[in-house]
């Protein structure tokens, strides 16, 4: 299975232009599963809820999801991507996964970062997993990386690959945590970060790139610099994420001491 | 507050000699809280339960705990250390924390690694926190590092410092995970690993040193190489671990979406 990320610089508010740019960059390569950055079609730095509402789209009926679905159908591939979602009166920082069958999964970001809290409603969708060519894939978005329970929930639900659209500003932090998310859950992770700067309402943000694909052993299989605009793919064997045996006496999941974990949260166990 | 670790090479089975060596190395420096490696007094590579039983000691009445308590009383300091514990008929891979008041906490390793499962009973003590000079300190041992719920439980119970006695054999893995444990919980971590080799019953283990002290921001404040035998101390401000605010809109703990964490384990929430 070939997985890939697209690291690029969205231009704020230029939904159609960003979508075109993405499809042109993706068109240069082949992958079974692509991961795009968070809020890839709108840009990040909103200054008001009204502005988000103007750019947000319903899923799956909005033009961005429709266009990506068409493209997935033409190519026979799957795409995980972040976008501003309009759901009735509510706005979510969401990630969707589309394929030839249409929309497979919608995840609304659980852990909102900084001013996102002023514009978006916290996610109300469960951390979930869908089948992509027979491989369970989970979705999380950007800041979710800092909360180990997010990736843990996905892995315990069977995720072999975690698709992680991001708009990271701190250099090196999520690159570290995502290696550990991969290691501690024995899953592949694909972090697609954006690059470039946005400067709005007196606040300047620099996005730090360094997108990466990590193996279940925490090895960085591919990564990008802080400036490169590129689509990067890697051939992986998703079955490697099924082997949770650390030694012949240790299994990453059955060794868990749920009886001793307190306060961590965990309905269903 | 000055915290430190001792990285050294225990000699297998030489309990008295190892204790003497430790006290001599610690005597060269001052710290309020010392962390020693896992199973520091016995060595690691047991070949039978009978052998463990011969070297294991009750806590707090065994000679190792008594000697360390006396030393802590003389120096007015605290020591977290790993030892083979004899408790009735059971054997545990335990960590204890002693100070001038005597034994403050006993933790029995929850996640046993590899052949430890053949010799030790899995821990039955909760992940817990005790006051060391007014600072809540939690204990975990070696392989616990790979399970994010261990450090998470300690941090949610108020730990500002996690003392982490270890006998690590994989180079670089726990050094990575413990940086993330510190980051994702905003706590200090002190990992005391051993060095040297043991070769028993046809199996050779090389312990990888690289002990480290990490700040709540994931910075490595001090670390050792793979061969050095040394006591290393760092002055820290434990109050830095009280600040869980990532931004003025984000708090590491109150941002947790316990409603969405599934299967992670978490009685009490």
Image: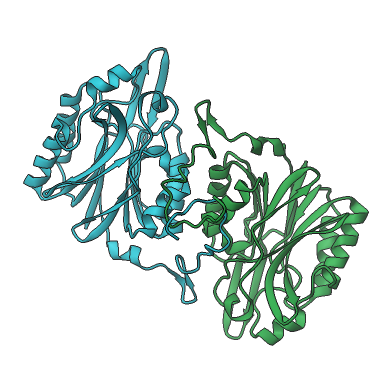
Chain colours: A green, B cyan
- Residue furthest to the top in view is B202
Residue B90, given in percent of the width and then of the height, sits at 29, 28
- Residue furthest to the right in view is A74
Q: Is residue B251 above or below residue B238?
A: below
B195 lies left or right of B64: right
Residue A269, given in percent of the width and then of the height, sits at 54, 50
- State the residue in front, B245 or A87: A87
- State the residue in front, A120 or A264: A264
Q: Is residue A62 visible?
A: yes
Residue B191, given in percent of the width and then of the height, sits at 34, 44
Q: Where does the N terminus of chain A fall, quadrant-wise?
A: top right
Q: Please give the count of numbered marks on the rendered protein.
A: 0
Q: Is residue A232 above or below residue B58?
A: below
Q: What residue lies at 63% left-to-right and 69% top-to-bottom?
A: A123
Q: Is residue B218 visible?
A: no
- What is the quadrant of residue A18 in the picture? bottom right
Q: What residue lies at 34% left-to-right and 62% top-to-bottom?
A: B241
B28 lies left or right of B167: left
Residue B220, given in percent of the width and then of the height, sits at 38, 51
- State the residue in front, A25 or B208: B208
Q: What residue lies at 85% left-to-right and 51% top-to-bottom?
A: A77
């Amino acid at each position: 299975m070939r997985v890939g990320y697209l690291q690029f610089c969205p231009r704020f508010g230029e939904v159609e232009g960003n979508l075109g740019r993405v499809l042109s960059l993706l068109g240069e390569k082949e992958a079974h599963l692509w991961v795009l950055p968070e809020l890839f079609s709108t840009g990040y730095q909103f200054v008001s809820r009204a502005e988000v509402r103007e750019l947000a789209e319903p899923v799956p009926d909005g033009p961005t999801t429709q266009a990506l679905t068409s493209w997935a159908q033409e190519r026979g591939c799957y795409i995980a991507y972040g976008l501003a979602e309009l759901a009735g009166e509510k706005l979510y920082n969401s990630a969707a996964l589309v394929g030839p069958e249409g929309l497979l999964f919608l995840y609304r970001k659980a852990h909102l970062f900084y001013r996102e809290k002023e514009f978006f409603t916290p996610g109300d969708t469960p951390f979930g997993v869908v089948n992509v060519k027979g491989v369970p894939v989970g979705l999380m978005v950007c800041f979710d990386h800092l909360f180990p329970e997010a990736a843990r929930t996905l892995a315990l639900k069977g995720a072999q690959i975690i698709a992680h659209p991001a708009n990271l500003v701190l250099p090196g932090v999520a690159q570290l945590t995502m290696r550990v998310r991969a290691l501690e859950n024995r899953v592949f992770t694909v972090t697609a970060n954006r690059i470039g700067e946005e400067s709005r309402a007196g606040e300047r943000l620099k996005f730090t790139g360094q997108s990466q694909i990590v193996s279940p052993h925490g090895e960085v299989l591919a990564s990008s610099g802080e400036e490169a605009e590129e689509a990067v793919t890697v051939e992986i064997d998703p079955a490697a994420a099924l082997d949770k045996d650390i030694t012949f006496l240790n299994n990453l999941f059955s060794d868990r001491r749920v009886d001793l974990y307190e306060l961590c949260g965990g309905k269903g166990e």
